[in-house]
Amino acid sequence: MIRVIAWNELHRRLRDRSVLIGCLAAPLLMAAVLGLSFAGGASATPVHIGVAGASPQMLTAALHASQLPKNVMVTTLPSQQSVKNGVADGTLDGGVALLPAQVRLHTLLVPIVDPGATHTPGFDVVTKGTSPLGQEYAESVAAGMASVLYAGRVPHTEATEADVAINSQSVGRGGKVNLNFFAPNIAVVFLFIGSGLGMRSLLMERSAGTLARITAAPVRPTQIVLGKLLAIFLTGMATIFVIWAVTTYGFGADWGNLLGVLLMAIGATAAMCGIGVFLTSLAKTEQQAFGITMLVGLFLALVGGNLLPSGSLPDAFQVLALGTPNGWALVGFGRLDQLGEPASSIIGPFIILLVIAVVAGGLAMTRVRKMVEP
Amino acid sequence: MEQTMLRCEGLRKSYGDREAVKGVSFSIAAGECYGLLGPNGAGKTTTISMLCGLTLPDQGEVTVDGFVGGTLEAKAAVGYVPQDLALYPDLSAVENLTFFGQLYGLGGKELQGRIGETLELVGLADRGKDRIGTYSGGMKRRANMAAGLLHRPKLLVLDEPTVGVDPQSRNAILETVGRLGIAVLYTTHYMEEAARLCDRIGIIDDGQLIAEGTAESLISTHGGRDKVHLSCDGSSLTELSAACLELSNVHNVHEHEGSLELTTDHGPAVLSAVVAVATKHGVDLTGVEVRTPNLEDVFLSLTGKELRD
């Protein structure tokens, strides 16, 4: 019976095209915008970037995160001064020096959020006006290092070591910088909005009278609610799949380990559905549901780091981020795509998302059941 | 003894301070069509909601086909046709019926067969694949009824199924209900429909069932006597009034705005005598109308107000 109710929901949403817009068109559009923004415009001319102050481990992770085009040559240098010298004499098109004494957790994400910031705490981005590409790629490397440091996977002490062995390497897979970072972010936002709007269907059915007809049938209230939830979950999974497929195959993004991505997609979808449905259950009308979904969705996106990395927000918000499903979804996805870690690394975030899903879903079930119970 | 398909006993339901249903009790036998007649707001829909398991009564009991009301078994025995169109406008009639049939455990060829039969029954067989949103108001109502009939319920509950429907579709709906042969609970505020369809009628007002019986018994008990209205030359009214009062079976004559109203046990029977009296007295009758009491009069008699107030 749950399957029947879920299929009816999907069937109707396919027929009125709302599911096509929400799960296919909008994610496709967003994925395309992201892809074109972050992965296009590669140049064949070699661009030389110098880096100082980063360990080989950290630099490898940072370059992986940066996804620089293949024509970018990265050279490790012993000091901040040697980077400046290289840029000054034209050997380098741009350079980055990590300044360990100035590295602070809450400022690390400035390079990610605003790569061209005049003041980039913790980093000295050295450029010259004649090479805009050199400046852009140097900022990208700085952003990559900042994201690696922020993720906390490389201790700060290692990051300050200067005895690097990497000499010169060609890096990147054709992307610019942050496609890997933003693609899951946007997917999570879509999940939340989609689940909240999906549950509006129950309110619409109540006002249309079809809910009364369904509840008059020999169907348990729990089956009705679970059927609706299943439909919302499936549309959520479709949304994240579309964004993953388009950004991966269309623009070369790397979300990381496939099993890990699948687990994170399931966990994030379940958690976002749970919260979205719970919030919708607080509404009495479709309009209220829409307003609540948008308001809370925007709040969670901000606090959870979907729009602005939480590191760029005050400390209190960084703590709050770990109370949001968005925050945990991004921790999991970040381990996979930014750090290239295996599926086992996201077990923690995955379990936390499932707990959020169970708690929020349970609360939602309690409230939504009242809508369908006599 | 006839099997009781629906029995409700002492149903009460309040919404806040307002008591919508105040101890309603009635029963419907298998194959019987029972009409619940009352004005808007009388408590018909609330009563139906309790019978169908959509609302829990504050007090009282419901039994459907021997099962406690609201249980899955009781719900499976009921075909519910709500007052509002309760179908998905973006889906076709066949798709709607497929979904609602599946909710009642139907599937496969059995379901497809039932859908065809039911659409045929309500006269929509040739429009089954069209979206409900493209139907006329009357067709939507018939499709609405089809969804309640699809699983062959033992009790069909129709909540004002003809409100806002064109005469042709209304007739089609009434004809369909009339030939079902199953127990039917039919709520309406159209007395003609109740009189035409229902074996028994319960009159409900202000949440209370105030009378119950066949249309004939209700009318004979509560409807009052026939009325004969005579319109004639005003100068002759007084003379004619006195003459009519002397006729046998005429109990009262009331003069009002240039016409006379005679109260009698049987209007058609006294009509020829009235015409003869008028001719004898040289009165030129300009209009004659015999009006037998109906359920409207019953309602007026019982409540002191019009049925459609």
Image (cartoon, helix red, strand yellow):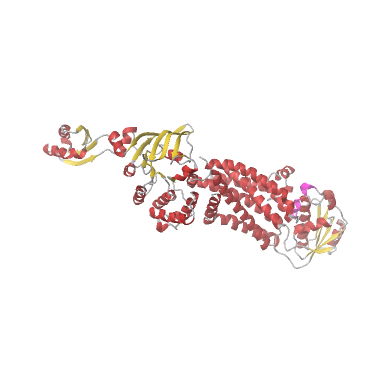
**Displayed quadrant of residue A71:** bottom right
User: Would residue A282 be visible to someone looking at this image?
Assistant: no
The residue lying toward the viewer, choosing from A235 and A150, is A235
Q: Which residues are magenta?
A: A104-116
Q: Position of residue A250 (x, y in %)?
A: 66, 63
Q: Is residue A31 magenta?
A: no
Total numbered badges shown on the rendered structure: 0
- Corner quadrant of residue A278: top right
Given residues A279 and A220, the one toward you in this image is A220
Q: Quadrant of residue A254?
A: bottom right
Q: Position of residue B21 (x, y in %)?
A: 43, 34
Q: With respect to residue A92, does A301 lie above or below?
A: above
Instruction: Let me know if residue A108 is in the magenta part.
Output: yes
Q: Where residue B125 sits: x, y (%)?
A: 40, 57
x 13%, y 37%: residue:
B277
Q: Is residue B245 visible?
A: yes
Q: Position of residue A147 (x, y in %)?
A: 76, 53
- Toward the bottom, the furthest residue is A44
Query: As drawn, which residue projects farthest toward the front?
Result: B1
Name the residue at 62% across, 59% down.
Answer: A28
